[in-house]
């Protein structure tokens, strides 16, 4: 996305030209980034959540709420998967002839047209190819939520969201303001040394 956008800006303002397909490809890549990234975020616990009250609860009760969070997220993801499939499937069947506006057909996909498009080659990329991000992304999201639920039930993790990053940042900011720059730098160095020692022990 960055390279294509940069190249298009250079083409437009330096060479007074334009990459015709750049905008549409950037939009498609952004859709893939978001839809695949949602599942990856569940895997890596990148998603942000509010857990101030949950963290005050005893571990057994906290686990119950974590399971409820996974269950509700899974129901929502299944609904998204159903909608994504119903939106994408017509483009792979009765509307398989529909092409994107500007994206040229890549050479490595040229074999698709003669097989599925009544023997005719596509001039532009068929819409079912970029739109496949919808069912694929939602299927991966369901898969990652099932994995997260299993990890919660087996006590491998206690949440499906990012853990306490905001609280740590606030504490560091308060310490920096109260203790001054040098003390905060010392704390940061000590924290990094401690993390390095823990990594060495794990290895």
Image (tube, helix red, strand yellow):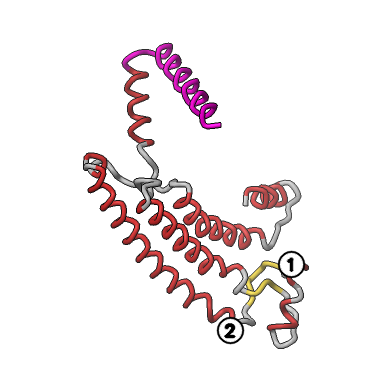
Q: Nearer the viewer, residue 27 or 182?
A: 182
Residue visible at 38% across and 36% down? 165
Residue under label 1, please give it. 106
Q: Nearer the viewer, residue 53 or 22?
A: 53
Number of residues whose C-alpha sits closer than 10 Å to that of mark 1, classed few (under 14), some (14–19) or many (20 or more): few
Foreground tag (1 vs 2): 2
Magenta segment: 178-203
- The picture quadrant where one finds residue 203 is top right
Total marks in image = 2
Name which of mark 1 and mark 2 comes first in the sequence: 2
- Above or below: residue 57 compared with residue 154: above
- Above or below: residue 122 compared with residue 40: below
- The picture quadrant where one finds residue 105 is bottom right
Q: Main secondary structure of the magenta part?
A: helix
Residue 84: image location, x then y, percent: 47, 71
Q: Would residue 96 appear left or right of 110 to someone viewing this image?
A: left
Residue under label 2, please give it. 93
Task: Name the secondary structure under disc 2.
Answer: loop
34 part of magenta stretch: no
Residue 134: image location, x then y, percent: 51, 67
Task: Name the secondary structure under disc 1.
Answer: loop
């Amino acid at each position: 996305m960055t390279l294509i956008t940069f190249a298009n800006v250079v083409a437009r303002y330096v060479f007074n030209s334009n990459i015709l397909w750049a905008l549409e490809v950037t939009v498609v890549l952004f859709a893939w980034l978001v839809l695949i990234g949602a599942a990856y975020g569940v895997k890596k616990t990148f998603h942000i959540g509010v857990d101030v009250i949950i963290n005050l609860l005893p571990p057994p009760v906290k686990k119950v709420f974590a399971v409820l969070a996974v269950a509700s997220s899974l129901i929502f993801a299944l609904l998204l998967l159903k909608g994504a499939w119903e939106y994408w499937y017509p483009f792979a069947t009765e509307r398989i002839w529909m092409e994107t506006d500007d994206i040229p057909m890549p050479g490595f996909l040229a074999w698709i047209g003669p097989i599925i498009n009544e023997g005719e080659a596509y001039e532009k990329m068929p819409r079912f190819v970029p739109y496949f991000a919808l069912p694929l992304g939602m299927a991966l999201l369901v898969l990652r939520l099932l994995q997260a639920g299993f990890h919660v039930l087996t006590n491998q993790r206690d949440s499906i969201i990012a853990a306490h990053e905001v609280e740590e940042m606030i504490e560091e900011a308060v310490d920096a303001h109260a203790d001054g720059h040098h003390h905060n730098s010392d704390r940061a160095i000590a924290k990094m040394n401690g993390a390095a020692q823990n990594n060495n022990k794990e290895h």
